[in-house]
Structures are given as structure tokens and as C-alpha cells.
Amino acid sequence: MEIPHSLYGCVLLFNNDITNTWPEVRATLLCKSPGSVLGGCPFFTAVFSELGCTVDWIYTEGQTLGVESVTQAAVVRGPARCVLLGERPALNCLARASGIATRCQQVLDMARTARWEGQLAGTRKTTPGFRLVEKYAMLVGGISMHRHDLSGMVMLKDNHVWASGSITQAVRDARSVCGFSSKIEVECRNDVEAQEAARAGADIIMLDNYTPQLLHTAALSLKQQFPSVLIEASGGVTLLSLPLYFSPHVDIISLGCITQGCPTVDFSLKVQGKLPSNESVVHDDKDSHYNDDENISPSHDGKEMANTDCSLPRRDFAF
């Protein structure tokens, strides 16, 4: 959570002696990127739920937002202090996830237009500490997450092969550990490595950094000899070059650009005013971690201050 360090921010958000009381407010979530795909709603809602606020969604997860310059996507209700505390981390999650979901939808539309029947996938090239949000956004956008982490599947890259001595030995060593329950993928830089990996029993052959023309030729040859092997194209694939990689002999195309350099969706949260008494958010006392009798929490300068409105613990979100 973003706890302000500046004097002014601390006064505005924590010093109830100056502001007297914190009213219940209604804030509208606005999207200013027309035609974007909405993604990351659970993370946005979770931030405000921790602060005792409620979120009512106008659009649903995965839905394309309006073509207007500004679209209302949701309404947040709660104490003003809590809405302001949750605003930035919640918007960060939503903007990033929606940006990735939108890009996924773009590449998926390209594949459908070309009538390519393979799978588009992301990579592990994600923002540190933010992988859960970004991988989730891939699912919302309609593509495969690929591996979530190293335990998702055995992938043998050049360094693994070097350490084992050969592709054949690396595949044999990996199979002895993972058994039949996990697939083994081998990253190959040329046709010789791809042939060796297929003969060694790899389930997936990744043709890495192939040009489109070489990719089509290599994929056709491998499929003719090893029909059950999956072929993945990866490395150097961009939004502009993606259509060139579509082939009936390529099963998977993975793109780092799904997350790397992906623009975010422009969202803002605007407080519209105080809530009428009949719309005020009901706070459950059992959610409070403060003493019900004293209802006090420590302030930044060590003094005790009354916590009259948003009596939930301050938590740091790793966003």
C-alpha cells in the first residue's frame, strides 16, 4: 500500500484532528483508452476490499470497453481516506493487466484472420514481483501462459545442454527426474539440434530465432519425421512479423512482446462526492484488527490518533 511520507500527505490521510472526520465517498473508475480489454478486476477489487471499500463493476472481466474517449468501468465506495490509499496500487494492477489482455486480443485476432489453428503463448519475461498479474492477464486475453515458473515444464536451453554434454544426455537426465508426468522441451538453434532433440525423445522442439522461411522448412521436415512432436517458434517475433510465422506445421508461437514493451491502459479514479447515508458502506467490526474499546492506531510521529472511519490495518501490497 502506498503510505505517504510527505508531511502534506500524512496530514491529509491520517490526521483526523485537522480534517475532523472522513466521509463516505463514491469514486468512478474511468477508462481513457478506447477499445481496450478489461483485465485484472480481481486484483483491483482485492486492494479496496482490504481497505473496507466496495467495488461495483459496470463491465465484466475480458470485456472490450467502449469506443468513447472516456468509459465508466466501475464504481468504488468507501471512506475517502481508504479510497485514496488504495487508488494507485489498484490502478497499477488494472492498467498493466488490461494492457496485456488488450495486446493478447490483438495477436489473437491476427491468428484468427489468418485462420491459423496453433496456440499463441507468452513467456516468463515478466515484471519482477508482478508475474501473477501478468500471467493472469494472458488468460483473460485468450492466449496461453506458457510456463508460470521453472516447475511448469522441463525446458532445456543451451546452458543446460552445455552442462550435460549433449542434447541427448540432457533429455535423458531430465526424463529420469520428471518421469512421464512432465513434458520436455528443447531449445534448438539449428536443424541439427532439432533432429537430435526429436530423436532423444523431446516432446516439444523450440526453433529459436529462426527466420520465417527457415522456420517453415524446418517445421515441415520435423513433422514429417516426428508427427507427434510439437513445434514451437520463438525469438524475434514481433507484432509486425507475427503473420509471417503462421504455418500449419507450427503448433505454438511464443512472444516476449506480450509483456515486454506492452503499453498500459489509461485508467483514472475520480471521486464524485459524498455518499447519501442510505448508500454508506457497512463495515464489519470483526474485520478490524484494532482494539474495539479504544479504536486507536499509532501515527507516524509516535502519537496515538483516533481511527474513526477506516479502522482496517495498513498493509503493504507488493505491487
Image: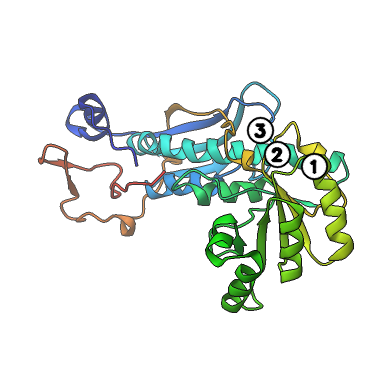
Residue sitting nearer the eye, 264 or 83? 264
Residue sitting nearer the eye, 145 or 213? 213
Give how far across and how far down residue 239 sits, in percent.
72, 34
Q: Which residue is mark 2?
A: 237
Q: Residue at x 51, y 31 (%)?
A: 28
Question: Tag 2: residue type?
Answer: Val
Q: Is residue 58 visible?
A: no
Question: Tag 3: residue type?
Answer: Ser
**Colour treatment of the image:** rainbow
Residue sitting nearer the eye, 59 or 99? 99
Q: Say whether marks 1 and 2 touch (CB < 8 Å).
A: yes
Q: Residue at x 64, y 48 (%)?
A: 122
Q: Is residue 91 visible?
A: yes
N-terminal-most mark, 2 or 3: 3
* Quadrant housing the N terminus: top left
Label 3 Cα crowd, 10 Å radius (few <14 / some 14-19 / many 20+): many
- Name the element at disc 1: helix
Q: Give the label on residue 245, or none.
A: 1
Label 2 vs label 3: CA separation? Answer: 23 Å
Q: Which residue is mark 3?
A: 36
Label 1 Cα crowd, 10 Å radius (few <14 / some 14-19 / many 20+): many
Label 1 vs label 3: CA separation? Answer: 26 Å
Left or right side of 22 for 193: right
N-terminal-most mark, 1 or 2: 2
N-terminal-most mark, 1 or 3: 3
- Name the element at disc 3: loop
